[in-house]
Amino acid sequence: MKNVVIGTSGHIDHGKTTLIRALTGHETDRLNEEKKRGISIELGFTYFDLPSGKRAGIIDVPGHEKFIRNMLTGVGGMDIVMLVVAADEGVMPQTKEHLDILSLLKIKKGIIVITKSTLVDDEWLELIKEDIKEKVKGTFLENAEMIAVDSVKGVGIDNLVKKIDVLTDETESRDINAPVRMPIDRIFTITGFGTVVTGTLMEGQISVEDTLEILPDKVKVRIRNIQVHGKSVDIAYAGQRVAINLANTKKEDIERGQILAQINSMEPTMMIDAKLSLLKDLSKPIKNRDRVRIYHGASEILARVTLLNQEEASTDENIYVQFRLEEPTTVKKGDHLVIRYYSPMETLGGAVVIDANPKKHKRFDEDVLKDLAIREEGSPEEIVEKQIDIHSSEFPDLALIAKLTSQQVNNVKEILSNLINENKVFMLGNDNVIHTKYYEKVKEELTFILKSYHNNNPLKTGMLKEEVRSKLFPKIKSKIVDTLIDTFVKNQVVKIQGKFMSLYEFNIIFTPTHEKIKAQLEEIYLREPYSTPRFEDVIQNMQFKKVDIEQVFDAILGDTLVKLNQEIILHVKAYEDAKLKLADYINKTGSITLSEFRDMLNTSRKYAVALLEYFDNERFTKRIDEKRILY
């Protein structure tokens, strides 16, 4: 069944609370001060049954300008609004401001209710109707039904109920499959039960024993009990007014305006990108860096407004802005905000969230403005792609993308499937994702680093893999970097040889001079295979440039030459011959001592020790006391 919340709006003392009492039979003023003064201060909540059988929640908002924040807290959850105008007074200042706010919040359905209709004659009533028509022209109520009632005498109430019932069929159903989101508008304690929070469930569904979190503080809470319209239920659905009993949570730990949400579904932010629409009759222009009040859900947040492409803006303009907040909050793309001057406290306009977790922008940046224009009307696929583009350097996982786009992970997976097929994103493993633009950027940097290295070291196998990694990602230690490098290997951008990385097409090419140096080095290291000279002495005795000798030496080290330690280098033939003789000896005798190995090779203790320790490190041999056995 569709769940609908109906609300009142209008000037103080125009009969909103009395109208609700006539509709529902319930009193919404709870505070003694409200009853004593005869005005609503806090929000009032109740419900009533419609002729079709639907049970509708109803919100009574205060009409006095001093309590505008409380009014704003209530209207955000309304599906249908009753704009209340008293017949004996007509449209008043708060009527107009409430109408502006309702329009800014993009409430789509409404009825104009003229109360106290029996206090005036028919001619006056027609004049009031004409005046109202003029005042609502160009708003969502321009073609709304206008119904005259007397709440005390019951005149017109039945007709109003029927019109409301018809209108509920025309309202859009809220998304019960989206991540849970409920702005908290009341917090109180019930003896024997503990802390209770109330609000309009904007999206999703909540079940008893669910664990949710309170944002922006990320405090986890467990749902002990749920009530909808005064009755305990197991599940509450989007569009319902809900009272929730929280287990093991103190009233003092929660504030009105916070959000009860699915865990990891939204990320707190200190900045919001938005499109700001200014009212037609501003008392003063809005200037860059002005301090403003932002109203969202049940919260009021102070912020500085950064005008991204101008110094100031005046009436009836639509501009891109970035709000820089004084405290964290949580919003979603497409949310509607009401913006008021910090002082005087007047409504200046409304804003639609374009990005709930943006990075700080430079002003007058054409790329930023073009990007905002694209994202303003972006599809879910475009929004996911943009968030991946923005956060690729963090190697985001699916859970983070879901949080940044306020979607379920399964929805993100479906969207990613399309983006992968369109070659717009790369998956790294099963859970992390980067944008193709970021992949190409890293590929370009990697190619530049290795090309520069190859130019300076044409005879080296490649650059140490860890050195490449540290140059590309100096601050990232995650193993996901290895997955990205593996992707470059798979796509034949680079190749890995042991500890070294090179461009895929790179090969060592010796010049005739290099070939002569290689041949001479091999001859030197084979001349006395187990009593080889130090490399410094080799350089001194060769008639080639030092730099050429070093380059050739580095190129054949690990292939033609084997470095046992910092001093001793052997030709690979001598190394393999020693290894073969050692294995044959141990296979025959069971073990070998250092002196036996030294005598076998007719070498010194220094070389025998270096070889045996190298074999130990290679796990070819194993030392037991003074003997070696095969590993």
Image (spheres, rainbow, N blue to C red):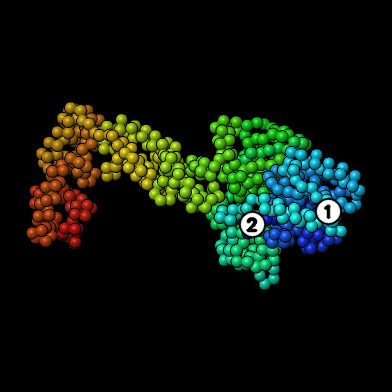
Amino acid type at mark 2: Lys
Secondary structure at badge 1 equals loop
Q: Is residue 105 left or right of residue 436?
A: right
Amino acid at circle 1: Val
Give the residue at mark 2: 2
Along the line of sight, which residue is nearer the eye, 450 or 371?
371
Residue occupying the far bottom of the picture: 192
Q: Residue at x 73, y 48 (%)?
A: 110
Whether residue 69 appears in this view of the structure is no
Q: Is residue 150 above or below residue 288?
A: below
Disc 2, SS: loop
Horizontal side of 578 relative to 383 (left or right) equals left
Query: Residue 323: percent from the left, percent from the top?
Result: 64, 41
In the visual, does 77 lie left or right of 39?
A: left
Q: Quadrant of residue 290?
A: top right
> Dot 1: within a 10 Å radius of its alpha carbon, few (fewer than 14), some, or many (20 or more) residues?
many
Q: CA distance from mark 1 to mark 2?
A: 27 Å
To which quarter of the image does residue 591 belong? bottom left
User: Could you tell me if residue 565 is visible in this image?
Assistant: yes
Relative depth, front residue between 145 and 392 = 145
Residue lying at 49% horizontally and 52% vertically, measured from the top left: 409
Residue at 17% in and 30% down: 515
Q: Position of residue 85 (x, y in %)?
A: 82, 48
Q: What residue did someone put label 1 on?
A: 149
Q: Earlier in the sequence, mark 1 or mark 2?
A: 2
* Residue 540 vertical placement versus 168 (above, below): above
Check the picture and name the quadrant holding the N terminus.
Answer: bottom right
